[in-house]
Amino acid sequence: MTIARRFLPSTSLLYSFEASARHQSFTAAADELNLTQSAVSRHIRALESHLGAELFLRERQTVRLTRAGENYAREIREALKHISAATLAFRANPAGGTINLGVLPTLGTRWLTPRLVRFMTEHPDITVHLHTRLQPFDFSGDPLDAAIHFGLPEWPGAELSLLMPEDIVVVCSPGFADKMEFSSCEDLLTAPLLHLVSRPNAWEQWFITQNVKAISLHGPLFDQFSFIIVAALHGAGCALIPRFLIQEELAAGTLIELLAPPLRSEAAYYFVRPMTHTASDSVQLFRKWLAQEAVYNNTKPSSHFSRRTLHLS
């Protein structure tokens, strides 16, 4: 697509506008940009002239965005972010081979990042930038080449490749297990249960699989697995956690698995890329490497049973 240059204001005008819109003040924008207030005001007037409409309502000594100005500010802010991200990515790897990957925070910190060292060693010409989100990724709004998606294989306009399933296990700290004296699945109903906001029915589903009637499930809410893991380590309660995220804790015995059959999630982890543009060689190579890592993760011998576990009836 050819870019019509007549629709592109200069970046100096856009910088002044974005700062003014964010601060709702020409003076504050001038301080941030190390300009005079009159220079920022001239930039805004020039941009309004270019657009053919006012962006701000001037009222005595204050300014505020028009409704159209608010919409324009959101778009310009995102565009400037994309330009900044592209420039940073280029400077990080001028030879090319940059991948912008969306990933869930805990998956990124506990599973992917430790493995990236091997990929970086094998492919020093490819740089992988991780972008974490708790909300679903949006390829139309995020500057991403691909993402690791947890859910069902449903993403219109995207290509999905299965990475690995997810087995959920019940864990707690050894000290907490000793204090509660668990002997059956029903005993868990007397304990604080740690809940993940994005999976509000997880405990209910687990008790159903154990044929246990659960009327009241009490315990704190967390928005990330990383917080739940730390809370469980410190004896805050029992947690339902994907086994692959806590392999080190299980092996070390700092978390123990309350052995009942693990709960296999209907959802799984997928490598996803948008169909709107062809995947680069770097993205294709990374996808194959990631698939191999996922296969190894699910086939390597499990060592966490070498430490203490607790069998529930």
Image (cartoon, grey):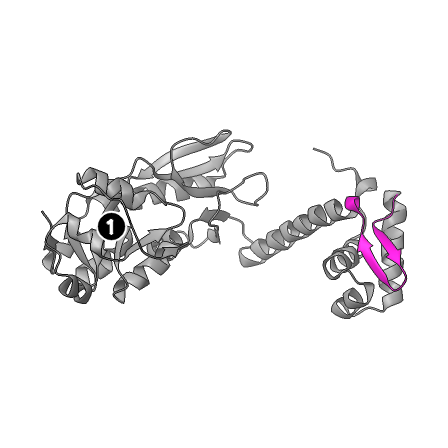
Relative side of 215 to 55, left or right: left
Return the residue found at the far front.
215
Residue 136 shows up from this direction: yes
> Where is residue 303, by image quadrant?
bottom left
Q: Position of residue 207 (x, y in %)?
A: 22, 43
Q: Position of residue 203 (x, y in %)?
A: 28, 46
Residue 166 shows up from this direction: no
Q: Nearer the viewer, residue 245 or 7?
A: 245
Q: Residue at x 51, y 29 (%)?
A: 157
**Disc 1 on helix, strand or loop?**
helix
| Quadrant (top left/top right/bottom left/bottom right) for the N terminus | top right
Label 1 Cα crowd, 10 Å radius (few <14 / some 14-19 / many 20+): some
Total labels: the figure holds: 1
Q: Residue at x 74, y 56 (%)?
A: 18
Relative side of 203 to 33, left or right: left
Q: Position of residue 165 (x, y in %)?
A: 28, 39
Relative side of 63 to 162, left or right: right
> With respect to residue 68, does 183 lie above or below?
below
Relative side of 84 to 251, left or right: right
> Where is residue 254, by image quadrant?
bottom left
Instruction: Report which residue position mark 1 lands on.
Output: 243
Residue 233 located within the stretch drawn in magenta:
no
Q: Nearer the viewer, residue 174 or 97?
A: 174
Name which residue type carries label 1. Arg
> With respect to residue 245, does 230 lie above or below?
below
Q: Position of residue 65 (x, y in %)?
A: 79, 52
Residue 65 located within the stretch drawn in magenta:
yes
Q: Which residues are magenta?
A: 53-68
Q: Nearer the viewer, residue 115 or 40?
A: 40
